[in-house]
Amino acid sequence: MVDLMTWRIALRSPGVTLGPGLPAAVVTAEPRFRHERMPAEIGLLLPTNEGPKQLIDAVVADPARCGDAILGLFMANPFLNISLEGPRLTGAGVRWVANLPSVEQQDEDFSKHLADVALDRERELDCLSRFRAQGFRIAVVVADGPGAVAAAAIEPDTMIILPRVADFAAAFPSLRQRGAAAQAVYEATRANGWHGPILGLGKAREAQHQGLWPERLDGLLCRPIRVSHEMS
């Protein structure tokens, strides 16, 4: 059985100019390890799944599972063969990809260890650039201002702000925390010449109350919900 999650995208209204065709959701694999105290956003980072190829195989076998959504792939995986998988995804109708989950979500000290073995943000950004060279539109996950500066350099179509692992320690990150991150990303990107749409993680009920959203967000990426499907 292959389990997926969908992350609904709610856009700020009245409509913001976000460019043509921003999808209504992101689709990712679901964590193999599930626990009531383990947020799915964190569980995705655990090395307990088969990697991006399993998700790609599922989408290629049944393109309706992704549809028009952004496909989130763990792009720090060294076995992701973009030259091979890009055309397969194009054939399945996938038009958008994102580095979700991302090593950007890890704490900075752990990220340094990942960088030592080349499993880092640079690999993810390189993968996104290579997907774009094949005609895909790209959404890049960032956590803070410096990460946003690096992401802006590859000129993504949109940015998604996700809190780091440590931000989930006590509970789901507060609006104040998320607002501060949105402000930092906004200032960093605008100062570096990138003016695309910024999405931030939020609860589903927050999508109906835009007055609660951090000011600098153009849209809300709702926390993921599980979609089960048994492959034949």
Image: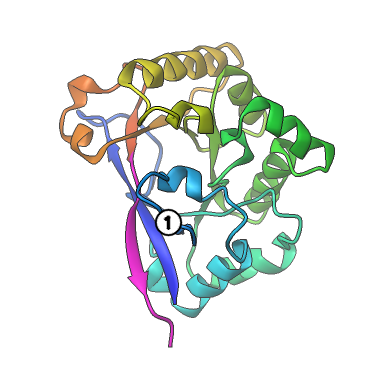
Which residue sits furthest bottom? 232
Q: Residue at x 62, y 30 (%)?
A: 151
Image coordinates for residue 145, horizontal then vertical, percent: 57, 18
Instruction: Specify the farthest residue to the right.
Output: 116
The residue drawn where x is 30% and y is 29% is: 16
What's drawn in magenta, residue-wise? Answer: 222-232
**Residue type (three-letter) at the residue carrying disc 1:** Arg
Q: Which residue is mark 1?
A: 34
101 to the left or right of 78: left
Point 69% across, 37% down: residue? 121
Whether residue 35 is situated above or below residue 217 in the rendered picture: below
Mark 1, other Cα within 10 Å: few <14 / some 14–19 / many ≥20: few
Q: 195 and 67: which one is in front?
A: 67
Q: Quadrant of residue 222?
A: top left
Identify the secondary structure beneath mark 1: loop
Q: How is the image coloured?
A: rainbow
Picture coordinates of residue 14, whole percent (x, y) = 20, 28
The reply to whether the magenta stretch includes residue 229 is yes
Q: Residue at x 63, y 39 (%)?
A: 103
- Could you tell me residue 6's position as x and y percent? 36, 55
Dividing the picture into quadrants, the one containing residue 192 is: top right
Quarter of the image with the C terminus in it: bottom left
Nearer the observer, 42 or 19: 42
Q: Position of residue 101 (x, y in %)?
A: 54, 46
User: Quarter holding the N terminus?
Assistant: bottom left
Q: Is residue 148 above or below residue 78?
A: above
Q: Is residue 4 left or right of residue 227?
A: right
Asked if the stretch drawn in magenta spans residue 71, the answer is no
Where on the picture, by quarter, is residue 12?
top left
> Left of 92 or right of it: where is 6?
left
